[in-house]
Image (spheres, grey):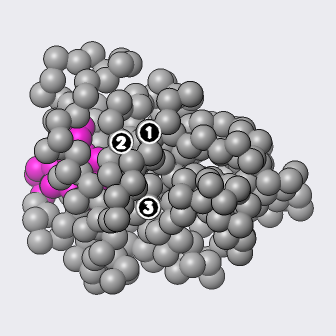
Amino acid sequence: MITRIEMTTNHSTLFESSLKSLKFLHRGKVRDLYAVGEDKLPVIQTDRLSAFDVILPDPIPEKGRVLTEMSFFWFRKLAHIVPNHLTEIAPESVVAPAEREQVARRAMVVKKLRPLKIEAVVRGYLIGSGWKDYQQTGAICGIRLPAGLKQAQKLPQPIFTPATKAPVGSHDENIPFDHAAKLVGSAALAERVREISIRLYTEAAAYAATRGIIIADTKFEFGTDDKGGLVLIDEILTPDSSRFWPASEYRVGVSPPSFDKQFVRDWLETQPWNKQAPAPALPPEVLRKTSEKYREALRLLTS
């Protein structure tokens, strides 16, 4: 197991966790999961970064701390819309004393639920894979859009464009609503996911606009509890799961600068790389600027 933990007085960098006091369950693209009993999961947000569905070899300093703090902020702010998976258990209380540095400010203990098999994507602006689909078909996930829209243009209203959940090394794929309904088990549940997702996005985007940030799009994940109730899970409205644009630099017709990992993607696009593992190492300047973008987004949204 590769573990890289660098401590300074200001920040920590964690590439992989190595807890011995808890049962290890799963290592995802950016998070590590363990078990506490039968019904709770400590989720550790590492500083790993994935781009083009490949885990990059270099961690982004403080990324895990920033994303954890931002998710806590949004979960609490939007709790009136839908229940979430948070518990009141401090992560430091469920690990051995020597392991507390690995979970401090970068982990949350959550309820164990049954995750739905889709990514609940909401788009408010025409960018990314949605822009590519629109150029080819005039639609996204079967949703017909007005003709003549430009890159990064605000959509007439937010749209729900679900996607598959791809394993590490594979690519998520946009899917029509009826396919999403089959994956979650019923049209009624899919309708509920769509309704809640658009409401979450709309309220978050309105708040972010007051802080000088445009949330162009985002993705949510949901699970169900033992009674079939819908619960918001994973991380929410972070630079890893959303496109955050500075409102002051937004222009229709071009891909705006962003607070998210688009900065890394842009650098990778200039490299002689086939977008298959292993990815190239990131220069120190790219790591530093990316970390700064994540921290600036947190400051603007929560200060």
Segment colored magenta: 252-265
Quadrant in which residue 104 is drawn: bottom right
- Horizontal and vertical percent for residue 95? 70, 57
Determine which residue is flagged by label 1.
4
Q: Can residue 29 be seen in this view?
A: no
Determine which residue is flagged by label 2.
59
- Horizontal and vertical percent for residue 202? 44, 72
Position of residue 234 relative to residue 69, above or below, is above
Report if residue 261 lies within the magenta region.
yes
Marks 2 and 1 close (CB-CB < 8 Å)? yes
Amino acid marked by disc 3: Arg
Q: Dot 1, how many residues are within 10 Å of its Cα: few (below 14), some (14-19), or many (20+)?
A: some
Secondary structure beneath label 2: loop
Position of residue 256 relative to residue 164, above or below, is below
Most common secondary structure along the magenta stretch: loop
Marks 3 and 2 close (CB-CB < 8 Å)? no
Q: Which mark is residue 65?
A: 3
